[in-house]
Image (tube, rainbow, N blue to C red):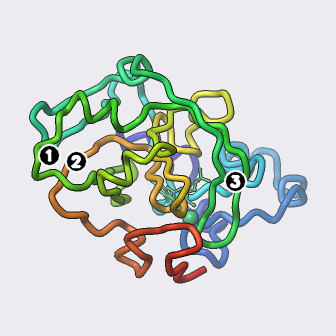
Amino acid sequence: MSDDSRPYGRRAFLGLLGGGLTSLLWAGPAARVFAPVTSQFSQLAANLLPVGGWRIYTISGSMPLFDERIWRLEIGGLVRKPVSLTYAQLRALPRAEQVSDFHCVTGWSVKNVRWAGVRFRDLLALAQPLPSAHAIRFVSMEQPYVDSLTLDQALLPDVMLAHELDGSALSRPHGAPARVVMPEMYGYKGVKWLMRMELVAREPTGYWEGLGYDQDAWVGRSNGYGS
Ligand SMILES: Nc1nc2c(c(=O)[nH]1)N[C@H]1C(S)=C(S)[C@@H](COP(=O)(O)O)O[C@H]1N2
Ligand SMILES: [Mo]
């Protein structure tokens, strides 16, 4: 699935990274005005155009391409019944909706984000975690991005696996077809381009946690290292 994950030149992309390792910091509308219309820059801008305060983040400089024919959500590890869901099967699960604020640990927020998706309760009911399962490891199609939540955290009432954002199917920049939403924690817990959930006995170290961020990313109560 990574074959066609680069709609623009890597060099053009890296040239845009500026100071931040992972953040695309946008210069505002002027950058668009001055970008040559046919350049890779403008193609990238068209893909990543920030709307409503979002910044689009990737760690790899590419965005995985969601192909409905190939994509599956795998649920495995410490479960009684390993599950492999197609996109249609995911969409057919009980639909949950919520409006919640989104906070990145680096200081930007988006208020009143409208998400729709499925609750982890419903996903876990399919796979039936074993008593030894304590946490969920979330694996992105964008390798090596991973993070985790304890089962208690994943079952909080405002936590979901989202497949819609503001009334539309999740777009590619925002993590199509599905991303983890955990409003009470900083955005790095919200794995985009999800492809696998693994039930584990102990919480593994997530991508940003390996770089010094707290395992529990409670908004206002975790370290915010690097912000
Ligand atoms: N696969 C993947 N998921 C990710 C990230 C990433 O780089 N790759 N960045 C995280 C961080 S730090 C934030 S703040 C949000 C940003 O979401 P957005 O790109 O939709 O604005 O995605 C989170 N999920
Ligand atoms: Mo973030």
Q: Position of residue 194 (x, y in %)?
A: 39, 43
Q: Is residue 190 above or below residue 207?
A: above
Q: Residue at x 41, y 81 (%)?
A: 212
Find numbered disc 2 in the image and state the secondary structure of the residue it sits on: strand
Q: Is mark 2 within 8 Å of ligand 1?
A: no
Q: Is mark 1 within 8 Å of ligand 1?
A: no
Q: Position of residue 170 (x, y in %)?
A: 57, 34
**Displayed quadrant of residue 106:** bottom right
Depth check, mark 3 against mark 1: the one in front is: 1
- Looking at the rendered structure, which numbered label has been put on residue 77? 1
- Looking at the rendered structure, which numbered label has been put on residue 54? 3
- Looking at the rendered structure, which numbered label has been put on residue 123? none
Q: Amino acid at mark 2?
A: Glu
**Is residue 203 or residue 86 the one in the foreground?**
203
Q: Amino acid at mark 3?
A: Trp
Q: Amino acid at mark 1?
A: Gly
Q: Is mark 3 within 8 Å of ligand 1?
A: yes
Q: Tell me: 96 left or right of 53.
A: left
Counting residues from the start of the chain, the first of labels 3 and 1 encountered is 3
Callouts 2 and 1 close, C-beta under 8 Å: yes
Q: Is residue 141 above or below residue 69?
A: below
Q: Residue at x 47, y 53 (%)?
A: 190
| Local crowd size for mark 1, using a 10 Å CA cut-off: few (<14), some (14–19), many (≥20) | some
Counting residues from the start of the chain, the first of labels 2 and 1 encountered is 1
Quadrant assignment for ligand 2:
bottom right
**Is residue 12 or residue 113 the one in the foreground?**
113
Residue occupied by mark 2: 198
